[in-house]
Image (cartoon, helix red, strand yellow):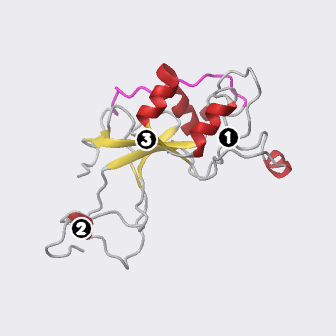
Amino acid sequence: MTIPGGSASDNAVPDAEPDREIVLTWITDYPGLVVYAPLPASGRYPRDRNGDPYYRSVRLRAENPGQPPRRPAGLLSDTDWAWMTRSEHAWRQVADKFGAQAEMIVFALARAACVTIGYDLKGSRPAPSPKRVYRTPTSLPQRSTAAQSAATSGPPCSPAPPNSPPTCAMNGPASPKPCTPPNTRTGSAGQSPPQPI
């Protein structure tokens, strides 16, 4: 419903049912990750003049939203792991800290469900560089428990064994295949995405 004289951001109906999360399924440039538009705290996206939901930013997250977070073995030191997962960070902070390895690190953490990666939109696609990195609520550094150890082959987000090579969570916990940044330059051929405002 559009409120006469109101801006697009005023057009959400307070008592309406919550929106379903918008997932940008036509963007397939990020193996092991999906692109989605986070729901506002109200549970409703803003509406345009036609009453359609719109969004201005997106995030990358693990393909399975219910996937428990797991610290990739050997990817970060305990100090860097604690820094990455204690709060959200601007991309410049991450890039300054990790240099040329920044993208590889955050994409590996996103595939392991420990962080999500925020982007502004450029047209209907994520901008070339991330804007922020957000920790997931369950990825805070914590001591492992017997229950966590019994439930998984290694407690979620537990300290990695020393001198272990980085592994890619999308390939399974036992896979030795290293993570590599996705190819963000290739598009999805033959797909015609909707145009967010």
- What distance separates the C-alpha of mark 2 from that of mark 3? 29 Å
Q: Would residue 42 be counted in the magenta stretch?
A: no
Q: Quadrant of residue 71?
A: top right
- Quadrant of res 153: top right
Instruction: Kindly state the secondary structure of the residue where label 2 is placed.
Output: loop
**How many discs mark residues in the rendered view?**
3
Q: Residues within 10 Å of mark 2 (few under 14, many from 20)?
A: some
Q: Amino acid at mark 1?
A: Arg
Q: Earlier in the sequence, mark 1 or mark 3?
A: 1
Which residue shows up at 57% across the image and 47% down it?
A: 64
Residue bearing mark 2: 51
**Percent from the top left, x then y, of residue 185?**
34, 26
Residue drawn at (68%, 23%) of the image: 176
- Horizontal and vertical percent for residue 65? 56, 51
Quick check: can you spot residue 29?
no
Circle number at residue 70: 1
State the residue at coordinates (36%, 32%): 129
For the residue pair 101 and 152, the one nearer the viewer reads as 101
Residue at image mark 3: 132
Name which of mark 1 and mark 2 comes first in the sequence. 2
Q: Main secondary structure of the magenta part?
A: loop
Question: How far apart are the alpha carbons under marks 1 and 2?
Answer: 40 Å
Q: Is residue 149 left or right of residue 33?
A: right
Task: Report the span colored magenta.
Answer: 174-188
